[in-house]
Structure formats: C-alpha cells, structure tokens
Image (cartoon, rainbow, N blue to C red):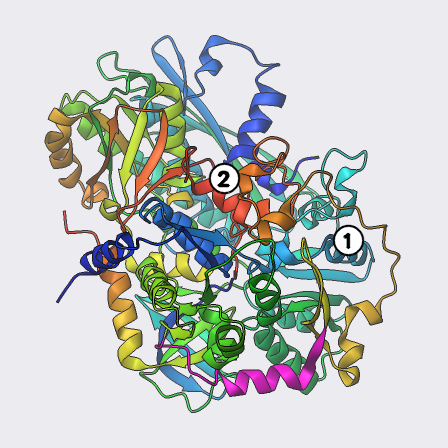
C-alpha cells in the first residue's frame, strides 16, 4: 500500500520508482533518471505540484509549478522554450484564488523567459482533490557544448551551492497546521534559468548540476555520488544557512541537509574552474551567497560530512516523510 | 578566549590520557544519541571510551501493545488520533502477520483512519475545540520532560470544559530503569550521561541515590557535542578518582531540585505506576498514569476496544540494544530485514532510536 | 529524549509568552514556569516553556552553538 512517505523523495520514493515504474517504462532516455529526459537536442520534463498551504511566505503553488519544471530543464543545461500547464481543480475553489495562482505563474514564466504554450483544466467533485493541483511539463533546447550530467563528476571536482539551504521546506512546514513558527522564514522558490544561462555564457566546464528539492542537499548529492561512483565530502561548517531557519530546524528536530530547496543550485566542476564559477554566481541576485561546500575525493563512493565538531559521518538517503519530532 | 573547537580538543586530549580499562558510558537520552551521531562524536572519542545508547527514546521503549491499542482506537469512527511525529511509523503487533506492510499509524492513516501529527499537545487541544463532534485522543508518551507539558494541556482542557479530549498514556520515568541497568550483572556501565532536559524537570538531586548508594558515576549533559564531551570528561574523572557523584554539567537549565512547578502540575494529574519497557520488561513504579479522579480523561477507560495478542517481531533484539548488551549491528535483522524503510523494531523507527541513528549516521566500519 | 532549545522572551501576555531564537519567533505556554519577564531565557519543549534558564549561561550556551555552527562569510 502506498504511504505518504512514498512521495517524500527519499528511499521509499526510490523504491516506488524502481519497483513499480521502471520495469514497465523501459527506455534509454528514462534510464538515466536525470532531472529531464534528453531526446536528441531537446530536454523534456514534467512535474506535478501539490503543496499545503498554497500560499506561503516567499511564494505560492503557481510560482512553484513554473520554477520546478524550468529548473529541471536548466539542470541538464537546456534553455526552456515552452511549458504546458494542467489544472485539476476541486469544485468550490474561488476565482480569486485561481487568478492569483495563474498571475503568479505568468510572472514566474516571464522571469524564466519561457512561454506557457498549452494547457488543460479538469474540475473534480469536492473532496476528490485538495483545492487545486497543477502539473506542468517543459521542453528545452540543449546546447551541445554545455551538457552537465552526474556521470561526468570526477575526483578533484568541488561542490558549490548557490545560496542558503532549507529555506523552502521550513517556510512551508512552519505554515502548515499547528506549527506556527514565524520570523525570517521565506521560501527561496525561483526559476534558476537566468543563473544557468550566465554559467553557460561564461563557457564554464560544469560536470553536474542539480536543484536540491525534495530530500534536500543530502539527497541530491547522494544521487550524484551513486551515479558517478564517487565519494563526495561536504564540510558542514561551510554550508550556508539562515540563522532563523537553523533555529526552526532545531525546534522541529529536522536536519537542514534533508529539507527542500526550490531556488538553489548545486554545481560540481573542476577545482580550477571554481573561482570563475563563484564569480559568475555571485554577480547574480540568486547566487549572491554562493559558496564552496565540499569536494569529490578518492575513496568509497557515497556522501560524507565533516561535522562542525570535526567528526565524520556518512549521509544516507532519508527513508520517509519529514515529520516534526519532539524527541 | 578559547574557541569551542579548541575546548573540545582540550577535552578530547584529556580523554586520550585515560590509561585504565575500557570504559563504557551510557547516554540515556535519545537526543544525545542523535547529537553524538550527527556530530560524528564517536569517531573522535579514544578507543578506550565507549559510548552506548540507553533506554531514553520514548518511542523505542514503548511496548508493541501500546501501538496496538492506538491502532485499535484509530479504527473507531468517532476517534481522531493526535500524536507527536515520532510515533507515526512504529509498527504494532501484526507486523509479523500475512500483511507485508507493518500496521503503523502511517499505515492506518493511508487506510482512512483520522491521524494527525502535532508539535505540541496544545495543538491537540485546539483540534478538540474545533472538531466538536469528534473524540480527540492524544498519544501521551514521553519522560518527565514531556509529561508535565501533557499534564498542563489536560489541565487547560479541564479548565475550559473540553470533554472530547482524552489521553492514551504510556508515560515513563527515568530513574528506575537506570537503577535496573546500573545494577544489572549483564553489562558493566561505568557511568551515565544523564538526560539534560529530563533533569531540568526532576533536578540533579534525583540521581543522588544512583551515585551515592549504588556507586554509579552520573553527569548531566546538555545537547551540544561540546557539552556532551565535557560530561564524558567528568565521568572519566569520577572513575579515575573512584568517587561516584552527580556532576551537573548543564547548570544553565538544571537545578538541584528541578522545576517544582512542572513537577506539581505533573503529579496533580498523574501518579506512579508499574510500567512495561520494551526489551526490559516490567519495572515497578517506572511509569505515570492518570490519577483516579482524572480517569475519565483516560482513553483506555473511555473506549473499550479489543486488542490483538501481542506479537513481538521475531528475531528482533531491540531489548538487548536498549539495555546496552549488544550494538545494533549485532542484531541479525539489522540492515537486512530491518531498515528505516521497513522497521521491525522500534529502535529502527524513531530517528533517535539507537538502530536508526546507527544506520543513518555511522560509517560502515563504525567503532 | 526531548528536544528543547533556549529562546529569549520578547513579551508576556497572561500564560503566553512570545519568544525568539536567532530570528525564529514562537508563542509558548508559560504554565510550567513562574515569574517570567521579557529578556529571560526559556527552554522550550513541545510548545511549553519547561524551565527558565540562567541568563548568562543561556547566552554562553547560545554563543557556543553560534560559534560552532557559524560559517565564515564568503
């Protein structure tokens, strides 16, 4: 039976995909399991968006639905050229709310420089869905000279993050149900397309890119380590995090490395290119707080963390839903 | 001023100076377990000092029968189960039955039971206020840190006349199992790293009989790795001086007498009772239940449900792990049929459970 | 067991206190502590203050946490 944990992006999600989808949908484009499938010179991706609450500090479901999909295109180096949007609407949703979401989608698509070119709408009876679910798909054009992929990661690469971690997940969870933590807790949801464009225009040799959404920085790097059979070592002290976000994580018993981001970029590239990449990132508002947080070293494949204390621990895939705990 | 890093290094050097037998200290608190694992503390301690996990994770020591009871209540059409996130994935009895999926509250929820996760028992109370036609049952687990909080919430319910609110209690106290473990012949524990936040409530005096009568070194520790290392140094000193005592290394929050107001609120509504600990068995006076005059808020009294026979998972050695007799990796199920995705025992469920922390954080070649 | 973090009191309204830690704000119940004043440090667990902390030591505690976790400016 399917549990909420199967949608968490962690180990259960992986199992679900591996055991129930991949055996039936066998083909080379899917097999790579990258953020987007690559078909000749096109990148193609789709994502369904459900979030409670639909409006949260720093963003909303509409902005998320556009950003998430264009970011998946950007992560394989593609320039988005068109999006689709499909709405499943629960009867009773107000026009006012729908309009707010649609306007937000339109503004976000403009930021990313991509048109929403096709769509669909279904209305379902009350209770059949929660408010509105949005599914977007996107097509992007691949530049053969700029094609990051986890399999290109090599020993000697460094890991860069474009800004602070855990902002989105904490902004959403602290608005959900009863956990009312306030403060500078704002989602980072944003289209990363301009940032990736800048990296591409700078002609940098980028080995891999990933936007660390569900499952956070840890999940993304675990996947990259597995795909490239490399050992990635993170330096906990270097990982940027807003102090209010850290405090909220401590209150709720969550590990910020496993909390979702929606406007951050992980970049793996040769050490010799690191300073140039940082310069490009920092010159853009989305990358102001960019920083080197780790490196690819020789040794057993996987993700390790040098803790602030100086100890070492191995980071593993998270198993299920992130729940606030008291213990 | 020395930096925390330098302080830690200084403490670690002092520990490295220990030339006696291997020392086994037990961290009693699950939050200590997680903090040690997250910070990689084990990888920094000298080999002669072993830190093992004790029975301080309320989820891990809560018996299977309690989860069964909560699951049975969740089947009642009028009941909304409200719980801390920690308990949601703990499997109940029929985990060994024909169903492949273990029957946890997460499983019950997927099958339509009304199960809600909250951060505070006050949120449960708020739900009872909103859902007037529902019966809100709060899963009342925890040690002396959490029980006063639950008692205060129940007191608020009573004061505001909220009747559709009740507790399924399995609250526990910490001193009795420590006595049982400290005096056990099964394993030699050279000292207890006492739980900081339980101690905030019960006070440092509560451990005096352990140290002064039973000769077991005690050090109360906060949760920063630095504070834990400081307490480990204190325990090592007690051993080397052969002078067991209670060192309070968390003075910012822990007073000798504890928090008398919290104790008062707790004991107004709760009274000691015998209690079953997973893997340890029944320990007299180691639990807390609602006093007779508040029984009507006891969900076990309010709703009569049939409970299945208790089935402990076959081959699971949570009990031995909780008593510190074996490390998680020595259990035959560990990492094989028992993983955080499909936990067999409670120690694998809670992220502060010894097995889960071990699985999640340790290096494969972990010491 | 038992997650709890030190938070500074901003204001008190009956048995509710507005508390803050590193810019994260929360309202907590004060049923289990006595004589709380703005500026005090409270240990917060599951929506309740479970202890008043010694201000100097609480600050020291927070400083340790801060210095251990702070990363240098890029």
- The residue beneath circle 2 is B359
SS at mark 2? helix
Residue A32 drawn above or below residue B280: above
Q: Quadrant location of residue B161?
A: bottom right
Image height check: is C35 above or below A62? below
User: Is residue C49 visible in the rendered structure shown here?
Assistant: no
Tag 2: Cα neighbours inside 10 Å, few (<14), some, or many (≥20)?
many
Q: Note whether B305 is above or below A202 in the view shown.
A: below
Q: In the image, is residue A89 part of the stretch drawn in magenta?
A: no
SS label for mark 1: helix
Does the segment drawn in magenta span residue B261?
yes
Which residue sits at x=46%, y=78%? B204
The chain holding disc 2 is B
Range of magenta residues: B251-273
Q: Assess disc 1: are there few (<14), some (14-19) or many (≥20) residues with their C-alpha within 10 Å of its C-alpha.
A: many
Percent of width and height locating residue A114: 33, 29
Residue that mark 1 sits on: B68
Tell me if residue B171 can be seen: yes
Camera-side residue of A245 and A80: A245
Circle 1 or circle 2, nearest the eye: 2
């Amino acid at each position: 039976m399917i549990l909420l944990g199967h949608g968490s992006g962690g180990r259960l999600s992986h199992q679900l995909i591996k055991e129930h989808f991949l055996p039936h949908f066998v083909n080379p484009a899917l097999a790579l399991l990258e953020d987007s499938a690559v078909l000749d010179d096109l990148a193609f991706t789709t994502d369904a968006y459900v979030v409670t609450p639909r409006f949260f500090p720093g963003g909303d479901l509409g902005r998320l639905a556009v950003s998430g999909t264009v970011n998946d295109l950007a992560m394989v180096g593609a320039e988005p050229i068109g999006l689709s949007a499909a709405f499943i609407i629960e009867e009773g949703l107000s026009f006012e709310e729908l309009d707010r979401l649609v306007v937000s989608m339109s503004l976000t698509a403009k930021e990313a420089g991509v048109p929403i070119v096709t769509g669909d709408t279904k209305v379902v009876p009350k209770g059949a869905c929660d408010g509105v679910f949005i599914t977007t798909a996107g097509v992007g054009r691949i530049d053969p000279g700029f094609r990051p992929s986890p399999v290109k990661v090599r020993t000697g690469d460094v890991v860069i993050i474009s800004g602070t971690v855990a902002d989105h997940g904490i902004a959403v969870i602290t608005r959900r149900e009863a956990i009312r933590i306030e403060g500078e807790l704002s989602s980072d949801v944003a289209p990363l397309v301009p940032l990736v464009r800048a990296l591409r225009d700078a002609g940098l040799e980028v080995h891999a890119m990933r936007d660390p959404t569900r499952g956070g920085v840890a999940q993304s790097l675990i996947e990259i380590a597995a795909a490239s059979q490399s050992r990635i070592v993170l330096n906990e002290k270097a990982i940027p995090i807003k102090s209010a976000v850290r405090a909220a994580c401590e209150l709720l018993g969550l590990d910020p490395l496993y909390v979702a981001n929606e406007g951050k970029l992980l970049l793996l590239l040769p050490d010799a290119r690191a300073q140039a990449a940082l310069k490009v990132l920092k010159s853009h508002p989305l990358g102001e707080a960019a920083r080197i947080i780790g490196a690819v070293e020789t040794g057993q494949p996987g993700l390790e963390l040098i803790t602030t204390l100086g100890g070492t621990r191995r980071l593993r895939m998270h198993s299920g839903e992130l729940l606030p705990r008291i213990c | 001023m020395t930096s925390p890093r330098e302080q830690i290094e200084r403490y670690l050097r002092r520990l490295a100076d220990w030339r006696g037998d291997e020392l086994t200290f037990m961290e009693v608190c699950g939050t200590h377990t997680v903090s040690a694992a997250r910070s990689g503390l084990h990888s920094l301690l000298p080999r002669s000092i072993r830190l093992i996990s004790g029975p301080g994770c309320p989820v891990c020591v809560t018996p299977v029968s309690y989860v069964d009871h909560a699951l049975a209540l969740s089947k009642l059409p009028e009941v909304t189960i409200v719980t801390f996130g920690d308990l949601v994935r703990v499997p109940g009895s029929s985990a060994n039955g024909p169903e492949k999926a273990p029957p946890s509250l997460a499983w019950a929820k997927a099958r339509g039971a009304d199960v809600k996760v909250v951060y505070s028992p006050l949120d449960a109370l708020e739900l009872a206020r909103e859902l007037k036609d529902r019966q809100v049952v709060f899963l009342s687990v925890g040690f002396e840190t959490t029980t006063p909080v639950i008692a205060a919430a129940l007191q608020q319910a009573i004061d505001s006349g909220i009747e559709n609110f009740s507790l399924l209690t399995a609250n526990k106290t910490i001193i009795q199992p420590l006595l049982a473990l400290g005096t056990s012949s099964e394993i030699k524990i050279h000292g207890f790293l006492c739980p900081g936040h339980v101690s905030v409530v019960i006070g440092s005096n509560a451990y005096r009989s352990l140290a002064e009568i039973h000769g077991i070194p005690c050090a109360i520790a906060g949760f920063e790795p630095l504070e834990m290392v400081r307490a480990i140094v204190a325990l090592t000193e007690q051993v080397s001086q052969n002078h067991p005592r209670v060192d309070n290394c968390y003075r910012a929050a822990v007073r000798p007498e504890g928090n008398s107001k919290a104790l008062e609120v707790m004991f107004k509504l709760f009274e000691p009772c015998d209690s079953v600990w997973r893997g340890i068995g029944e320990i007299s006076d180691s639990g807390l239940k609602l006093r007779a005059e508040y029984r009507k808020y006891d969900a076990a009294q309010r709703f009569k449900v049939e409970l299945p026979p208790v089935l402990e998972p076959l081959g699971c050695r949570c009990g031995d792990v909780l008593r510190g007799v074996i490390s998680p990796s020595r259990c035959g199920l560990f990492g094989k049929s028992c993983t955080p995705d499909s936990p067999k025992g409670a120690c694998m469920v809670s992220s502060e459970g010894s097995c889960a922390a071990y699985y999640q954080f340790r290096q494969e070649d972990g010491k | 067991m038992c997650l709890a973090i030190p938070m500074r009191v901003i204001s008190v309204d009956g048995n509710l206190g507005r508390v803050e830690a590193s810019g994260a704000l929360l309202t907590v119940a004060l049923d289990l502590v006595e004589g709380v004043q703005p500026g005090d440090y409270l240990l917060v667990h599951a929506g309740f203050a479970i202890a008043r902390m010694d201000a100097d030591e609480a600050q020291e505690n927070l400083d340790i946490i801060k210095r251990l976790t702070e990363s240098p400016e890029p």
